[in-house]
Image (tube, grey):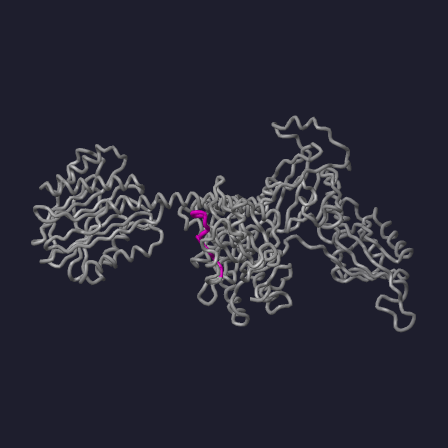
Amino acid sequence: MGEATRGPTGAPWADGDGVGGPGGSELEDVLAAHLIDAVQHAGAYGGAVYLRSPDRRSLVMAMVTGLPRSVVKLWWRLPVGGALPAPEAFRTGRPVHLADEGETMRRYPQMLVGLPYRFASHYQPVWVGGEVVGVIVVLWSVAVESATGDGVRAPMAAAEALGTSLAARARRSGPVEYDGEPVSVRLPGEVPGVRVGLVDWNLDTGEFRADEKACAVLGTDPESFGGTIADLQDRLCPEDRHELRAAEQDAEAEGLIRGRMFRVAESGPVYGAGPAAADAAAGRVSWADTEYDDVRYRPVELWGRTVELPEEGPPPPGGAGRRLVGVVVDAVSGTTAAEAAERLPDGVFSLDQDGRVSYANRRCEQLLRCAREDLLGRYPWQVMTWLSDPAYEDRYRAAMLSQQATSFLVRHPVGEWLGFLLYPDVHGLTGRVVPSSPPPRDRAAAETPVPETGAEISTPVAVTRPGALYHVVHMASVLTEAVTVREVCRAVADQLLPMFGGHELALYLVRDRRMYLAWESGYPEGFLDRFEGVGLDVRLPGVEALTSGVPIFFESPEQLAGAYPGIAMDRMRSWAFLPLIASGHPVGSCILGYDATHAFTSDERAALTALGGLVAQALERARLYDAEFTLARGLQDALLPHRLPPVRGLHAAARYLPGTQGMEIGGDWYDVIETAGGVALVIGDVEGHSVAAAAVMGQLRSAVNALATSDAGPAEVVGRTNSLLAHLDAGVCATCCYLELDPRTGRGLAVRAGHTSPMVRHPGGHTEVLDVEGGLMLGVDAHEDYPVTPVELPPGAVLSLYTDGLVEQPGQDIDEGVRTLRESLSRTPVDSLEDLADSVIQVARRTADRPDDMALLLARCAGR
């Protein structure tokens, strides 16, 4: 892919899709139209569009509206595999709706780590050509009821329309993808704009021509307006007639009129109901003859410039003479609003949609001790570094994301306390600054003398920005869910590359003072082979970063080659080599590569350094876990039968599948035991997943084996095993199904202790669940008597004993799991019990998230 060009806001468009490149403005227009449509029709305050990245590993925010880009900067790039709502909607192709912050916390706790604010959200996948290419996001304040019903249908319709538009574009320009910064677009304003009209004033004849918009500003109808300066003068507030004369004097003296303000009478309803006012409104008398208090006036500004008239040719439309061409401006939402704010005793300021100061009154200057000229057009925390604190910016983010007023206290460097009150909407934020008392714990600060306004202030150094802090907190949250070394490596690759915009990642671990690759992503095949097993005395940046404990950053290939002559390099242009050290112990190195020149900011270097420590701790913990798990799995393997004993007249097959969560070791067991009366088939399950559960399982298996070979009947075997577990005081219970069978006749006796009932597959494929009477789980009551149920297997039938892990899945009713097992048994040929066992367990293997172990025991009488 060629180097990206830049979009209208400086954001790069993938594959040259920038303004001036093919299709860049078209893509922006398409996204903007559908995003704004979704937000407006949903009754929301903001939203965004994510598109997939060229490497398909990330979702990249292509456009945002209704909230500052800076507020959502941490979410510009999301890993496709992340546990977040937008990636889930992308992966599954199904919408995700979060009604409030409570639901967000329950379903996506990682999201609230970075955005712990009150808002509702909806994530709608965008389909093109049978695949998801992006996600439309819509945000509501939790107080808005539009977050359901029609509000949810709006982004669905917008996503469908956007998919159609993107499909048409894809046919012309190739795949839909994005790899730059988001473009910010404004929602259409709901506040009426400033009205402006054109006027032409002949200063010699008094003719005053006004277009339709100017007549509206002056409060008159174009058809009834007389068209002279006298007609305009009749509409003026009597106190302002001198302003019109002064404007004429300005025009004669300077050739300019600069914002002369006067008040004109409204043509609509007036305050009061006197006869004179009614006559004036009807045009029967002059406005000047009405009572002053009966008229409603509107402030208007006049701006203009005199023009030179041609000496020859026909007279202009306004007639010959000295002419002033200009505009009349409705001053209600402009100057008068600013004048009102200037008179307030509190500081008042306004931030635009991007968070920059667009207005500050004089009192704001005094309280903040900062000139307006320094504030306007800049972020407040850039000018006043004492506001550059994550806690204060958090309140700003909370206001913009929740669309609810918020406030906070700040101590000015001179010692006084100021209260900030923030009032947001979709176009920006209005704030108030008021003097405040210190909080109780800081009452002593009130004694600090306050210098006069304008005194020189020594401000402290700005603290770290919350962006870097969030990256550390978010990664810590993700790593808490990773248990094994493989899971930690996968989490680091899935999160670190999108988080910092990298394209290659390698994780090396130290073993016997050598470096071995644990995980890589993005490297050319075979490139890292030359570095495998290098010693800690080799001069390589990854090794020296670890041995010195100091991260190393290279922003160009020339820097890397200059520091390490002859080092092998691929297509990357910048690198970060991070030491992984946990509690002073070297764990390994993390290498992050960028395919374009990348300047590492101080915040980014600090965040990457901190993340290296977190990753090291997680890897060290995971290595201990893996070692413990290897030991535990060895114990479990030793306790389970390595093979089933051959029994005359019986064919049997068994399978065991561990769970995929926690220690992945449980207490499931099975056995085939030859007895004096035939054969005993047993299956059981000790609750819990731990080494202790496996140890209890081993004790129960040994007990059942000993009792079964001692001529004890099924009820006695299960009863005495129950008594043993109860007296062991192991703190766990167990289930068990025990069946003693005569292989020659297929008849037998079954006992069930809280376990799932056996299942039989008949030769024709029909399956049924045996009705075996059950008793309490083992270990609950040492004196429990277990009932015995006679059973008989038809010729050619297959008996199936199984643990509940095979039929229980998260979010699924157990009856549904039993139906699935019956279907699997019925549709598979039974020529080989081994093939049948493989087929049944293979269905279970397709479920990646298995919270419980699974055991399966199949048996068929050979002579029947």
Inspect this view and state whether residue 154 appears: no
Give the left or right position of residue 20, taking residue 623 as reference.
right
Q: Residue at x 60, y 67 (%)?
A: 16
Inspect this view and state whether residue 506 appears: yes
Quadrant holding the N terminus: bottom right
Quadrant housing residue 704: top left
Q: Position of residue 182 (x, y in %)?
A: 59, 57
Judge by depth and name the residue closer to the eye, 179 or 343: 179
Q: Residue at x 76, y 61 (%)?
A: 222
Q: Position of residue 595 (x, y in %)?
A: 56, 60
Q: Residue at x 72, y 56 (%)?
A: 195
Quadrant holding the C terminus: bottom left
Q: Position of residue 212 (x, y in %)?
A: 74, 62
Give the left or right position of residue 678, taking residue 62 as reference.
left
Residue 788: in magenta span: no
Judge by depth and name the residue closer to the eye, 135 or 6: 6
Judge by depth and name the residue closer to the eye, 191 or 277: 191
Q: Main secondary structure of the magenta part?
A: strand
Residue 519: in magenta span: yes
Give the left or right position of residue 592, taking residue 670 as reference.
right
Magenta residues (range) = 510-523
Judge by depth and name the residue closer to the eye, 373 or 802: 802
Q: Residue at x 64, y 61 (%)?
A: 8
The mark total stands at 0
